[in-house]
């Protein structure tokens, strides 16, 4: 979708994390394609300690990009049992509270395309200079490192908007 891969076997959080239930009852958590392009090549990544507890909509991990401290929101409640990173294609392995993923608040299947269309519009608005008219994309594919392509953007404000920071 829009040149971004959104695998349909995953559940997507509106804060751009994904959750994939594993056969053993654990859940693998990663960053979706748009989120990954927003924080590509971060200055730092801070993952929670194994054994720590994460909560839905609380901080799952932090990424530092262009001076912005980006808090990636957790798609589930549970105990962290493993950590990875961008190089692994996932960030956390979680044992969900209650033994299974509560996905009622997550997006899946046909819900993904309209959500991503709105997210692309929100991103364009966040990146547009205040005095410049906003134009819609012509079907092009977002670059791999969006931050590097917009050096004048207020990256803290852009990340706050897209990653649902308070």
Image: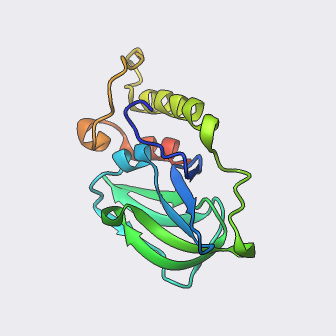
**Foreground pick, 69 / 50:** 50
Q: Residue at x 66, y 62 (%)?
A: 56
How many numbered marks, from 0 up? Answer: 0
Q: Is residue 95 left or right of residue 70?
A: right
Colour approach in the figure: rainbow
- Residue 73: image x %, image y %? 56, 58
Q: Is residue 77 left or right of residue 119?
A: right
**Foreground pick, 33 / 134:** 33
**Foreground pick, 124 / 69:** 124
- Residue 51: image x %, image y %? 55, 85
Does residue 16 sit above or below 124 in this rendering?
below
- Residue 31: image x %, image y %? 45, 55
Does residue 151 sit above or below 103 in this rendering?
above
Q: Residue at x 54, y 45 (%)?
A: 8
In terms of image quadrants, where is residue 65?
bottom left
Q: Residue at x 28, y 61 (%)?
A: 43
The image quadrant where one finds the N terminus is top left
Q: Residue furthest front?
A: 23
Q: Residue furthest bottom?
A: 51
């Amino acid at each position: 979708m829009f040149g971004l891969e959104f695998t349909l076997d995953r559940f997507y959080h509106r804060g751009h994390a994904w959750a994939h239930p594993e056969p053993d009852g654990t859940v693998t958590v990663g960053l979706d394609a748009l989120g990954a392009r927003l924080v590509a090549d971060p200055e730092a990544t801070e993952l929670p300690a194994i054994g720590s507890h994460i909560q839905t909509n609380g901080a799952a991990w932090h990424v530092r990009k262009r001076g912005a401290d980006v808090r990636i929101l957790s798609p589930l409640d549970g105990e962290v049992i493993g950590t990875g990173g961008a190089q692994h294609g996932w960030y956390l392995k979680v044992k969900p509270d209650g033994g299974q993923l509560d996905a009622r608040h997550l997006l899946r299947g046909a819900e993904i395309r309209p959500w991503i269309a709105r997210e692309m519009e929100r991103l364009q608005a966040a990146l547009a200079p205040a005095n410049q008219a906003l134009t819609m994309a012509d079907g092009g594919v977002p670059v791999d490192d969006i931050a590097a392509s917009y050096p004048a953007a207020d990256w803290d404000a852009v990340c706050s908007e897209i990653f649902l920071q308070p």
